[in-house]
Image (cartoon, rainbow, N blue to C red):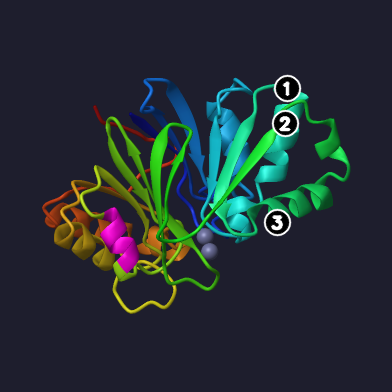
Amino acid sequence: MRILFIGVGEACDENYPNTSILLMAPNDNGHDKTLLLDCGFSAVHAFWKYVSDPELLDLVWISHFHGDHFMGLPLLFLRMWEMGRNKPLVIVGQRGLKDVVERAMELAYPGFMNRFRFELTFYEVEPGEEKSICGFRWNFAETEHSRCNLSVAIETPHGKVFYSGDGKPTNESATLASGATLMIHEAFHVMPKVPGHGTVSGVISIAKDFEIENIALVHVQRDVRRWKQLQIRKMLDKSGINAWLPQPGDTLEFD
Ligand SMILES: [Zn+2]
Ligand SMILES: [Zn+2]
């Protein structure tokens, strides 16, 4: 499977597009699928730098309803329509997803949804449940954030990918990440005790406690990234685990 970091930024970062990850993997039936994890304001423009086929994407996961995680959807859909997409698209997220996405689309481009030639299928999921969607096994757990945020674990034949969305890890989300081939986690700050967000030190200790092979830190606060990047890289190097602070456009591959 292949992971492409389209964006790794937080909401207000002028240099880094909002955190958004493209996951390309075969599903349980051996069919190659492409999944987008979150689609914020600035992620959608970055997405089209890497993707030229309007039908490449099979599914979009939305972790929560903050703009830097879902407000790119209207423009994503609009451009898919403009480029002639016919293939259905699956959208997965927490309860209320369909209503929120349809309202956002109607505010951004009134009436356009009626013109789409592709079908949108929504799956609204609950923390703690297990689902089979698009030929993958999915599990969900809530993190501690200012809005309800679901972290997600997606099992593929090539390994398990965990993505935190936003939020401080909880017992449930750390357990969900257990044994992951790759944990992609937000690390808004460096040290512990930041309400509602993950930290570099917190993510490293979870990776050690829950036997996670590889970690990638995203959604780093813009001033922290600017002034403490060296400190973060030293912490990751010293951690003894495979750890990345990816840049937009970076890819990771696992067999
Ligand atoms: Zn965010
Ligand atoms: Zn958020």
Earlier along the polypeptide chain: callout 1 or callout 3?
A: 1
Span shown in magenta: 172-177
Of 117 and 225, which appears nearest the observer?
A: 117
Residue at 51% x, 38% y is 36
Residue tagged 2: 79
Q: Are marks 1 and 2 in contact (CB under 8 Å)?
A: yes
Residue at 26% x, 31% y is 254
Rounded to the nearest angstrom, the CA distance separating label 3 from label 2 is: 19 Å
Of 97 and 13, which appears nearest the observer?
A: 97
Ligand 1 is within 8 Å of the C-beta of the residue at disc 1: no
Which element is circle 2 on?
Answer: helix
Q: Position of residue 20 (x, y in %)?
A: 50, 45
Q: Quadrant of the C terminus?
A: top left
Residue tagged 3: 100
Prevailing SS of the magenta stretch: helix
Q: Position of residue 29 (x, y in %)?
A: 38, 23
Q: Quadrant of the N terminus?
A: top left
Residue tagged 1: 83
- Mark 2: few/some/many CA within 10 Å (<14, 14-19, 20+): some
Q: Position of residue 132 (x, y in %)?
A: 44, 40
Label 1 or label 3, whichever lies nearer to me, is 3
Whether residue 210 sits left or right of residue 59 in the image: it is left
Q: Position of residue 97 (x, y in %)?
A: 64, 54
The image quadrant that residue 186 belongs to is: bottom left
Q: Is residue 110 above or below residue 225?
A: above
Magenta-drawn stretch contains 174: yes
Whether residue 31 sits left or right of residue 87 in the image: it is left
Specify whether residue 234 is in view: yes
Three-letter amino acid code of the residue under disc 2 = Arg
Whether residue 67 sits left or right of residue 223 in the image: it is right
Label 3 or label 2, whichever lies nearer to me, is 3
